[in-house]
Amino acid sequence: MKLVLVVLLVAYASADVSHIVGKTGEANAKILNQELDTGLEGQYRWTYETENGISASEQGAPKIVPGAEDAAEVVQGSAQWTAPDGQVVQLTYTADENGYNAQGSHIPTSPPIPDAIIRSLEYIRANPPKDIN
């Protein structure tokens, strides 16, 4: 039960979009649609949409993990908003016993590994160093 309450609090906190709308007056945007459904077994689903194009949804349920003291929570969600530069940002995420995984075009990714480094690693793998004993 404690885990479900913690997840619901995290879900509520993640729904705070004040950091997205800034000081443009959009913080007072009206909510057009808002739903929250909780089940007796710990499952839940929430969604909302505002008049300025912000929307988010999430659903989760407990999952029994063998060897774990408590059940893990399995969560899937998404959010969409328009950035100050006019770009529509879409975010999807999952969270489970393996951690939090977010995907979206606005999330930075690391650059590709240079070919010279890949060739060097392949050479080392093919020619492991000999013991110096």
Image (cartoon, rainbow, N blue to C red):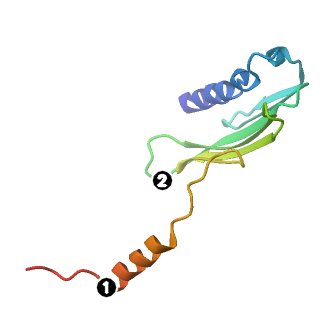
Q: Which badge, 1 or 2, is on the more N-terminal residue? A: 2
**Mark 2 residue element:** loop
Amino acid type indicated by mark 2: Pro
93 is higher (above) or lower (below) than 42: below
70 is higher (above) or lower (below) than 15: below
Amino acid type indicated by mark 1: Asn
- Residue 66 screen position, x and y as percent: 48, 53
132 is higher (above) or lower (below) than 101: below
Q: Residue 127 got which mark? A: 1
- Residue 46 screen position, x and y as percent: 78, 32
Mark closer to the observer (1, 2): 1
Which of the two residues, 127 or 28, is positioned nearer the viewer here? 127
Q: CA distance from mark 1 to mark 2?
A: 41 Å
Is 67 left, or right, of 13 in this rendering?
A: left
Where on the picture, by quarter, is residue 1? top right
Q: Residue 66 got which mark? A: 2
